[in-house]
Amino acid sequence: MKKIFLYTLVGSLCFSACKKDDDVATYQEPSDIATQDSYDDQSIKKFMDENYLDVQGNIKPFSATDTTDDKEKKLSALPFEKLPSGTIYIMRDGAQPTTDAQTIKDTDIIKLMGKVNTYVAAQTDGNVAFTSQTAFLNTINGSGIPSIDPMYYYVKQQTLDAATTAVAKDASYYQIPGFREALLKFKAFNNISSGTPYNLQGVIIVPSRAAFARNAHYPYLGISYRNRSFVFNFQIYGRADRPTDQIQKPK
């Protein structure tokens, strides 16, 4: 009888432990959007305090055991700008184009090299931080070839015309407004070749309210970006004027 009781107790404890782990891993969407906005802002601050840029401009987390990064400046210690939308951008010193720098327009075709990750800002045991990191783009460790004309920057009129639902006929279904807003603050290189070694220009951090928030959106990579913030770590290899027939018609 004692053995049966002991096995039952151990089983109950294991079940409780597993259930607790599951509860921690499960994101509970705040009913109040203002709460999610607050989580985003707190998580962005924490992210900027815990990461730095390496010699090629890649975002790297500080190591708790390796002292080689002790002299690196955290992102929050670098000059940065915060836009009204809550989007933050950092222009990396010495990495901006100086010869033939190209002004970017909001209708341009862009050529983008870099990494983009998305996160959900959540509170776990009283601690607010980014969780659920998911890759959105990685041309550095992937193909090594810049991404050209991504829809999350600008969607063609032909795509809107071909949509079969009302929501998909709206540019906001595809585009990330915070990214678009911040990218216009940068200059593009003059169409450098795809094989040119990268030297990332900076960082754009987009809170969920300046991304897709809780709205319907294009199913990039087949996952939901509801409540997800985006971190862009990038270099603009080039830009080009968009053909007139691809430009969105005014509403």
Image (cartoon, rainbow, N blue to C red):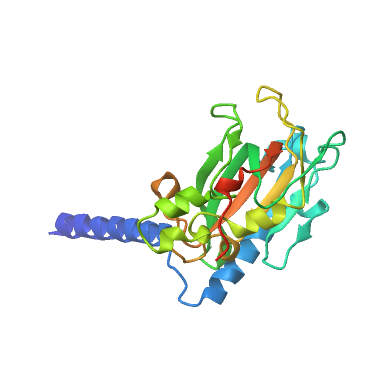
Q: Is residue 90 left or right of residue 47?
A: right
Task: Give the quarter of the image for residue 80.
Answer: bottom right
Q: Nearer the viewer, residue 196 or 51?
A: 196
In the rendered view, would you say 57 is above or below 208?
A: above
In the rendered view, would you say 238 is above or below 123?
A: above
In the orientation shown, which residue stands out farthest toward the top?
195
Q: Nearer the viewer, residue 122 or 231?
A: 231
In the rendered view, would you say 22 is above or below 97?
A: below
Task: Give the quarter of the image for residue 176.
Answer: bottom right
Residue drawn at (33%, 56%) of the image: 18
Q: Position of residue 201 (x, y in %)?
A: 75, 40
In the orientation shown, which residue stands out farthest toward the front?
245
Q: Is residue 48 visible?
A: yes
Q: Position of residue 251 (x, y in %)?
A: 55, 66
Q: Position of residue 1 (x, y in %)?
A: 12, 59
Residue drawn at (76%, 50%) of the image: 90
Residue drawn at (67%, 66%) of the image: 85
Q: Nearer the viewer, residue 25 or 64?
A: 25
Q: Is residue 63 visible?
A: no
